[in-house]
């Protein structure tokens, strides 16, 4: 078997949707060597959205393909490289991370997972002919205005389906809800259920599922099948909205990064996963709202976080744990007056040992991530390490005799 070609990058972004492209823009602009890997279409699901009227900066609206083309153009302007291929395997638990495709192994200092997901579909007959801009939609927020005074159908009865149906009722003249349960039984919360049942624009088809989708170039009819009688009913609609779930693209990350019960990537507000140097962004994250605008926000945060991680890794390796001299680190807090008062003494001690000792001073708050790498969350504190970078003492004892004695023992 032919050996895979290895390439080195600062950042590898898995997924080229709105989140991945935004992260790429930020990383490229920070002059990081950046690669975006996309297995299908650059721009992701947004490219299939015919009208986008709620993205800031476009008062007349735009379409997903045009908007994502602008994102890609901007990423390329900042030197971002694109590879259209599928990621087969990842190794993310070491400083040098690996993202493996069919032909390559891409090594990176940081990885951003922006692999998105896919809305679940009914798998009814002819469905594939009408997906996205041909009559079947998965986003009421995106396509509600385009259905003003029209008849639409909603598939599903969970919170998302009913809440999106209520939103559609502000625009459409009629909303037909297909529910697989008996009359009166729905999967949404009771408040949403009561509001929907009292909405004059909403009509419910109980005990039904989609049998087929019919039409020429655009969806015209949804054929429902009654689960109890087997009877088929053809209903003329302008658009059908499907809200039966969403599947995140996280199969290859199982048992590697932390995922929710539903398979979504778990991150903090800075887009950090539990693995150092691994970040998440966009629809793949465990969050509430999945829109282009929220994906952009995630991507921006992830890009900045990746840049900061790489910069701090270099500082940690080359300055904090440098190997030219014995290391002496003083941890203090700008909000703790006693610990600040010790700063001049620490600098005087460094001068005494200037030929053999390197002092680093860290604010426990401003330099929190660096302190986290040293497993330090208190102040004041002193840390000593050998020329080999081995930490040999970590103590809250910060008096001069203790420090001098410790440094002499390491020389």
Image (tube, grey):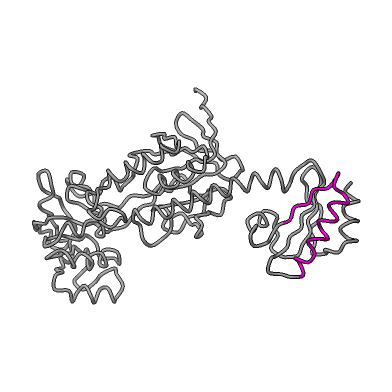
Q: Position of residue 182 (x, y in %)?
A: 20, 69
Q: Position of residue 19 (x, y in %)?
A: 40, 49
Q: Nearer the viewer, residue 98 or 363?
A: 363
Res 348 → quadrant: bottom right
Residue 86: in magenta span? no
Q: Nearer the viewer, residue 215 or 73?
A: 73
In-image side of 316 versus 73 (left or right): right
Q: Report the span colored magenta.
A: 338-361
Report the residue that reaches farthest toward the top: 2
Q: Position of residue 318 (x, y in %)?
A: 70, 43
Q: Is residue 86 above or below residue 58?
A: above
Q: Residue at (71%, 69%) from the top-left corner?
A: 336
Q: Residue at (18%, 71%) from the top-left corner?
A: 183
Q: Position of residue 362 (x, y in %)?
A: 70, 57
Res 172 → quadrant: bottom left
In-image side of 294 versus 172 (left or right): right
Q: Nearer the viewer, residue 344 or 8?
A: 344
Residue 341: in magenta span? yes
Q: Residue at (48%, 46%) from the top-left corner?
A: 112
């Amino acid at each position: 078997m032919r050996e895979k070609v290895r390439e080195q990058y600062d950042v590898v972004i898995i997924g080229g949707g709105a989140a991945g492209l935004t992260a790429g823009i930020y990383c490229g602009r920070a002059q990081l060597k950046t690669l975006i890997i996309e297995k299908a279409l650059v721009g992701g699901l947004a490219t299939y959205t015919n009208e986008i009227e709620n993205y800031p900066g476009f008062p007349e609206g735009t379409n997903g393909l045009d908007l994502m083309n602008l994102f890609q153009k901007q990423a390329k302007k900042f030197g971002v490289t694109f590879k259209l291929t599928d990621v087969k395997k990842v190794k993310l638990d070491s400083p040098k991370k690996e993202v493996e495709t069919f032909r390559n192994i891409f090594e990176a200092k940081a990885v951003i997972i922006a692999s998105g997901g896919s809305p679940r579909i009914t798998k009814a007959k002819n469905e594939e002919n009408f997906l996205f801009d041909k009559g079947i939609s998965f986003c009421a927020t995106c396509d509600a205005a385009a259905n003003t005074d029209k008849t639409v159908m909603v598939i599903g009865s969970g919170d998302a389906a009913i809440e999106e149906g209520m939103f559609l009722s502000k625009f459409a003249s009629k909303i037909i809800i297909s529910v697989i349960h008996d009359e009166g039984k729905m999967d949404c919360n009771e408040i949403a259920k009561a509001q929907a049942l009292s909405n004059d624009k909403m009509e419910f088809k109980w005990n039904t599922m989609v049998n087929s989708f019919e039409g020429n170039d655009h969806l015209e009819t949804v054929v429902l099948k009654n689960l109890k009688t087997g009877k088929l009913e053809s209903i003329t609609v302008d658009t059908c909205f499907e809200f039966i779930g969403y599947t995140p693209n996280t199969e290859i990350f199982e048992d590697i990064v932390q995922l929710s019960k539903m398979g979504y990537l778990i991150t903090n507000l800075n887009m950090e996963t539990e693995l150092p140097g691994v970040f998440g962004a966009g629809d793949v994250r465990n969050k509430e709202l999945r829109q282009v605008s929220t994906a952009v926000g995630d991507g921006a945060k992830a890009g900045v976080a990746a840049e900061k991680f790489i910069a701090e890794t270099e500082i940690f390796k080359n300055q904090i744990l440098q190997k030219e001299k014995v290391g002496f680190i003083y941890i203090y807090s700008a909000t703790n007056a006693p610990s600040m008062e010790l700063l001049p003494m620490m600098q005087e001690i460094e001068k005494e040992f200037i030929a053999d000792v390197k002092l680093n001073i860290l604010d426990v708050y401003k330099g929190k991530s660096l302190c986290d790498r040293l497993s330090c969350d208190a102040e004041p504190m002193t840390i000593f390490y050998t020329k080999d970078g081995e930490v040999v003492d970590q103590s809250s004892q910060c008096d001069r005799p203790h420090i001098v004695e410790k440094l002499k023992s390491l020389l």
